[in-house]
């Protein structure tokens, strides 16, 4: 039975990555060992689970059907082990999709979580534009915006304050705006991509801004602003240190700026959430920049 469970775990990893070499490296096993486990699983169920060529791997229909069963079996085993062994024995991999600014924020605090749960492994997929949970094989995914009413497998984490900032060199060269309307005459470095102009919500009004650079990465926007290219609207956690050091200066600080609402989505709507995932979810809530959500 233990071999079957191990083979199922390997199958899930291979199905999510479709690459034997990647799974072998992450499992600290040889390519041959990973392939043998899949062979044993196919022999056990009497069907082909993967289509293998020299160029790619793909799941067969039977493999797709087994994947759901394998995940459910593994989650139940992990839950039983955590339940009988206590929270300190929670172990396994938890994959989290997270935005750039929050990913860096949490990465600086994972050391405390690791100290409490040394058998947990956490993998961050950091991107401001996330894939779906199923496509990325994520356990948890942070999203900008309130969870949809029908999303019973999502909850609100909290709000992220945002601030307008610019490098001192830019303000010396171009002056500081006195009102939000003045932003229309400034180089505004916005987050986004595509033909539509960026819109900033300031003082309860929408301002359509423009500038010489735009990106779908808050880190890219931050670096452009820090270089003196223009004024940017960025998460406060991303720039608070620079503001304190005088590397960046707040712009229009007396005007209210709508915060970003962050929610977290998971893929356990129809099954019990494993202890390892619950521990990480609790960590995300407890270490949220503004503290845990009061609700």
Image (cartoon, grey):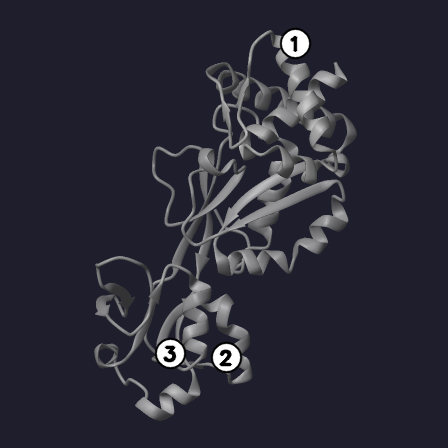
Residue position marked by numbered label 1 in the rendering? 44
Q: On the rendered structure, is 147 left or right of 34?
A: left
Q: Which residue is mark 3?
A: 253
Secondary-structure class at tag 3: loop
Q: Who's the residue at 70% across and 16% down the image?
A: 4
Of labels 1 and 2, the one closer to you: 1
291 up-or-down from 48: above or below? below
Q: Nearer the viewer, residue 55 or 4?
A: 55
Of the numbered discs 1 and 3, the one sitting upstream in the chain is 1
Q: Look at the image and tell me in which quarter the N terminus lies.
A: top right
Task: Give the mark nearer the N terminus: 1 vs 2.
Answer: 1
Relative height, residue 78 to residue 291 (above, below): above
Give x and y (percent) for residue 100.
49, 58
Q: Position of residue 291 (x, y in %)?
A: 55, 57
> Element at badge 1?
helix
- As drawn, the label of residue 243 is 2
For disc 2, the neighbor class at 10 Å (few under 14, some 14 to 19, many from 20) is some
Residue at x 74%, y 43% (from the top left corner): 117
Q: Is residue 175 visible?
A: no
Q: Is residue 271 visible?
A: yes
Foreground label between 1 and 3? 1
Q: Quadrant of residue 3?
A: top right
Q: Whole-Å distance between the Cαs marked 1 and 2?
A: 61 Å
| Marks 2 and 3, the one that precedes in the sequence | 2
x, y percentage for residue 15? 55, 28
């Amino acid at each position: 039975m233990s071999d079957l469970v191990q083979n199922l775990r390997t199958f899930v990893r291979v199905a999510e990555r479709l690459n034997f070499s990647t799974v072998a490296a992450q499992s600290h096993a040889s390519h041959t060992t990973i392939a043998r486990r899949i062979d044993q699983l196919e022999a056990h169920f009497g069907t082909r689970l993967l289509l293998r060529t020299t160029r790619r791997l793909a799941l067969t229909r039977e493999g797709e059907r087994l994947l759901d069963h394998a995940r459910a079996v593994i989650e139940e085993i992990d839950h039983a082990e955590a339940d009988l062994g206590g929270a300190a024995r929670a172990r396994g991999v938890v994959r989290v999709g997270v935005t750039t600014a929050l990913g860096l924020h949490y990465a600086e605090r994972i050391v405390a979580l690791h100290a409490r749960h040394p058998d947990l492994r956490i993998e961050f997929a950091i991107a401001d534009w996330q894939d779906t949970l199923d496509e990325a094989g994520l356990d948890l995914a942070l999203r900008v915006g309130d969870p949809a009413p029908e999303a019973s497998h999502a909850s609100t984490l909290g709000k992220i304050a945002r601030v307008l900032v610019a490098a001192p060199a830019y303000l010396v060269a171009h002056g500081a705006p006195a009102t939000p309307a003045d932003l229309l005459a400034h180089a505004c470095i916005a987050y986004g991509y595509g033909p539509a102009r960026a819109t900033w919500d300031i003082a309860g009004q929408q301002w359509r801004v423009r500038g010489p650079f735009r990106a779908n990465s808050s880190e890219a926007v931050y670096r452009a602003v820090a270089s003196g290219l223009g004024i940017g609207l960025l998460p406060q956690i991303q720039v608070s240190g620079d503001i304190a050091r005088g590397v960046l200066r707040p712009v229009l600080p007396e005007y209210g700026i709508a915060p970003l609402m962050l929610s977290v989505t998971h893929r356990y709507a129809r099954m019990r959430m494993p202890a390892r995932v619950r521990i990480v979810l609790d960590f995300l809530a407890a270490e949220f920049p503004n503290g845990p959500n009061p609700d």
